[in-house]
Amino acid sequence: MSDRRNSAAIPRRRSWAEVRWRQFRGAPRPVVRAVAVSLSVAIVLAVAYLGYDIALSRGATLPGGDLRLLAVTVYVVLVLAIGSLVTWLIVPQPTGSGTRARRNGWSAALGFFAAVPIAYLVMVVAVQVIKPLLT
């Protein structure tokens, strides 16, 4: 009888994929907000860059010439800055027993560190996957 109780109390081992899926489903709201903000900003700016890149590759003459390197630099800076700023605005620190929401640099840092890989991944998908489909 005691063996059955002990074996029932031990949870089964989950696979690596099951553990990651549970972590994904139960992600903290501040992290989800930071990723969503950075992802939405990166998608909007990547679509603008993609339009500029396709126009140049089709022979359009735009004022200033070929400024794709500058456009990618501005894209990265804006995704990082806007992602950090908006995350700082919408992710306050826990209030504890108080009612006033407090913010500090950690919220902005969360947005910045969420924006770094998203900026890269969205640009890679735009240039390496979507652009060949459109040209």
Image (cartoon, helix red, strand yellow):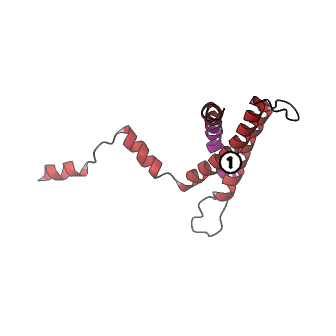
Q: Residue at (60%, 51%) from the top-left corner? A: 36
Which residue is disc 1 drawn over? 41
| In the image: residue 92, left or right of residue 13 | right
Q: Report x, y in % for residue 129.
A: 60, 33
Judging depth in this view, the residue of 87 and 73 nearest the camera is 73
The residue type indicated by label 1 comes to Val
Q: Is residue 125 magenta?
A: no
Q: Is residue 99 magenta?
A: yes
Image position of 118 with respect to 94: above or below: above
Q: Is residue 68 visible?
A: yes
Q: Report x, y in % for residue 58.
A: 75, 30
Judging depth in this view, the residue of 106 and 16 nearest the camera is 16
Range of magenta residues: 97-122
Q: Report x, y in % for residue 60.
A: 81, 33
SS for dot 1: helix
Q: Residue at (88%, 33%) from the top-left corner? A: 64
Q: Quadrant of the C terminus?
A: top right
Image position of 24 with respect to 123: above or below: below
- Residue 90 sits in quarter: bottom right
Q: Report x, y in % for residue 127.
A: 65, 33
How would you rate the neighbour count of disc 1 (Cα within 10 Å): few for under 14, some for 14-19, many for 20 or more?
Answer: some
Q: Which secondary structure is most common in the magenta stretch?
A: helix
Q: Number of marks in the image?
A: 1
